[in-house]
Image (spheres, rainbow, N blue to C red):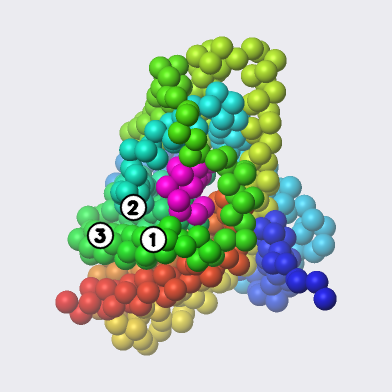
């Protein structure tokens, strides 16, 4: 009897999409009314399925709609997406998603996710060019010699830097670009690809989970809850430091075990295949010439410019993709790659990440099914009713798990914030705690589930590293349990202290 293999990321997502389609036949369709600010006319538009009402953009209008958010949050542009209006949920005509909708969902998802897909493909082209020049091999060889005996520093530095990016400006999708670069570095340090994956993905997840100044998470959620984003900041900062330390200890213990005995690696059976894929970077004869230094400088500057643009210039995927495209052309000139060779290398490099792009599109297709089937608001409505009559400690922890569950259906942090906060945050008033507790529970719940959420970024990340979802779960589940228990303790302390 042949061993049954764990399904691929694409198959897992298609199974999930099929289950979601089935749920649209079982869960009643429903909607909350939404409120949108019209900057040009300085008015609010309250929309339901059958009508739309216009209100002046004043605090009195918000109070009338039971929305406890300062009006300046809309006028200043802090809240730019439609928000849910409390106490307006209604059951609507069911829109079950059939076989045709299921088949079309990945296509619709790919179209909706075109911005991030193009970013991934352009980065793939850039990686293909740099691999051809040998700049990566030479740079990694130099780094391996420099860190000899102190390789654990690499784990600490990479994890902390990415966590800082996550907590400050929401570094998440952008980390897709780091895997092809950093995996050879970790392999050269005698670790396995799982260590590289953990440093990048866990760093990003912890950073976004414990967001401090992240505009797509803590700030927009606080605004939508009607509180200042600095309220609850101290608790989130303590969580950031504590959870980062927990993750570092967990990864370093695993990494040192693998370094001493490669057979202890969870992905030991893939060792040769992964090393062949990402190259053997321990060749001591590789020279880091001035030309290769310049190529690496341009490559690194692409990331620095991207990070600056996202955090300071309101850049998003079009601008980020443009930076990597220009970087590719500059590297082609520096390496004196002929035009036909440049195009061939670029296309082949993009092709290497095509499977990742498809995974991102299929994952978005799951959200398409949820939206078209109109069951997202129903899930939110029932989730908000679960907490009725709870004491404040139980309420805070219930919110943690509610948000973890909702993030399976709504993996976007900003989308979750504007959709749920106007409805969920007032529940804190009823149990006598601050609304920042709901904001924190939203962040922690989404962040914890992001470690394993198949509709999030993890499957796309695993596809780059060529690691199965089952092996990732084997590695990360003990850490998730530890972090969940620690988070529950911290949330309880924040409620009662």
Q: SS of the residue at dot 1?
A: helix
Can the viewer see residue 171? yes
Q: Is residue 201 above or below residue 328?
A: below
Q: Which residues are magenta?
A: 177-193
The percent coordinates of residue 156 (x first, y second) are 32, 52
Please identify the dominant SS of the magenta region. Answer: helix
How far apart are labels 3 and 1 at the CA level? Answer: 22 Å
Residue 471 place in picture, x, y as percent: 58, 65
Q: Specify the farthest residue to the left.
A: 497
**Residue 152 numbered tag:** 2
Instruction: Answer with mark 2 or mark 3, whichever residue precedes in sequence.
Output: 2
Residue at numbered disc 3 = 241
Tell me the residue at 42%/64% (across/down). Answer: 257
Q: Is residue 491 magenta?
A: no
State how far apart marks 2 and 3 are (Cα): 19 Å
The structure residue drawn at horizontal position 66% and vertical position 58%, both measured from the top left corner, is: 9
Nearer the N terminus, badge 3 or badge 1? 3
Q: Is residue 180 magenta?
A: yes
> Label 2 neighbourhood size at 10 Å, few (<14), some (14-19), many (20+)?
some
Q: Residues within 10 Å of mark 3 (few under 14, many from 20)?
A: some
* Residue located at (56% from left, 12% from top): 336
Quarter of the image with the N terminus in it: bottom right
């Amino acid at each position: 009897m042949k061993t049954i293999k764990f399904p691929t990321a694409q198959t897992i997502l298609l199974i999930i999409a099929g289950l979601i389609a089935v749920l649209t036949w079982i869960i009643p369709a429903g909607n909350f009314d939404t409120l949108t600010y019209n900057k040009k006319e300085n008015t609010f538009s309250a929309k339901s399925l059958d009508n739309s009402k216009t209100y002046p953009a004043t605090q009195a209008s918000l109070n009338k709609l039971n929305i406890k958010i300062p009006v300046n949050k809309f006028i200043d542009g802090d809240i730019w997406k439609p928000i849910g209006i409390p106490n307006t949920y209604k059951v609507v005509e069911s829109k079950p998603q059939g076989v045709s909708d299921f088949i079309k969902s990945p296509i619709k998802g790919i179209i909706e996710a075109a911005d991030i897909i193009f970013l991934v493909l352009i980065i793939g082209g850039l990686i293909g060019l740099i691999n051809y020049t040998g700049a990566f091999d030479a740079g990694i060889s130099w780094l391996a010699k420099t860190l000899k005996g102190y390789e654990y520093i690499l784990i600490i530095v990479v994890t902390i830097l990415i966590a800082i990016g996550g907590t400050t400006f929401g570094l998440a999708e952008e980390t897709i670009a780091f895997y092809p670069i950093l995996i050879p570095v970790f392999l050269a340090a005698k670790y396995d690809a799982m260590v590289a994956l953990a440093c990048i993905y866990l760093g990003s997840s912890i950073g976004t989970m414990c967001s401090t100044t992240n505009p797509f998470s803590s700030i927009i959620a606080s605004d939508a809850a009607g509180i200042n984003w600095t309220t609850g900041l101290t608790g989130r900062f303590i969580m950031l430091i504590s959870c980062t330390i927990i993750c570092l200890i967990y990864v370093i213990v695993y990494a040192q075990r693998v370094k001493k005995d490669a057979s202890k690696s969870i992905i030991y059976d893939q060792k040769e295949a992964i090393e062949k894929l990402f190259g053997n970077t321990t060749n001591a004869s590789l020279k880091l010439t001035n030309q290769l230094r310049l190529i690496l400088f341009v490559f690194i500057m692409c990331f620095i410019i991207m990070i600056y643009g996202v955090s300071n210039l309101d850049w998003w995927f079009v601008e980020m993709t443009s930076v990597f495209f220009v970087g590719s052309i500059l590297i082609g000139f520096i390496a004196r790659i002929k035009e036909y060779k440049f195009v061939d290398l670029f296309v082949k490099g993009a092709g290497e990440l095509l499977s990742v792009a498809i995974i991102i599109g299929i994952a978005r297709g799951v959200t398409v099914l949820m939206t078209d089937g109109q069951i997202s608001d129903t899930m939110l409505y029932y989730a908000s009713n679960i907490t009725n009559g709870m004491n404040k400690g139980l309420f805070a922890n219930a919110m943690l798990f509610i948000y973890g569950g909702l993030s399976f259906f709504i993996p976007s942090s900003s989308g979750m914030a504007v959709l749920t906060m106007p409805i969920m945050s007032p529940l804190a008033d009823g149990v006598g705690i601050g609304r920042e507790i709901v904001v924190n529970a939203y962040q922690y719940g989404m962040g914890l589930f992001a470690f394993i959420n198949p509709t999030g970024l993890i499957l796309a990340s695993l596809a780059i590293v060529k690691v199965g979802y089952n092996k990732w779960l084997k590695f990360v589940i003990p850490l998730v349990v530890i972090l969940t228990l620690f988070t529950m303790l911290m949330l309880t302390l924040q409620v009662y202290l």
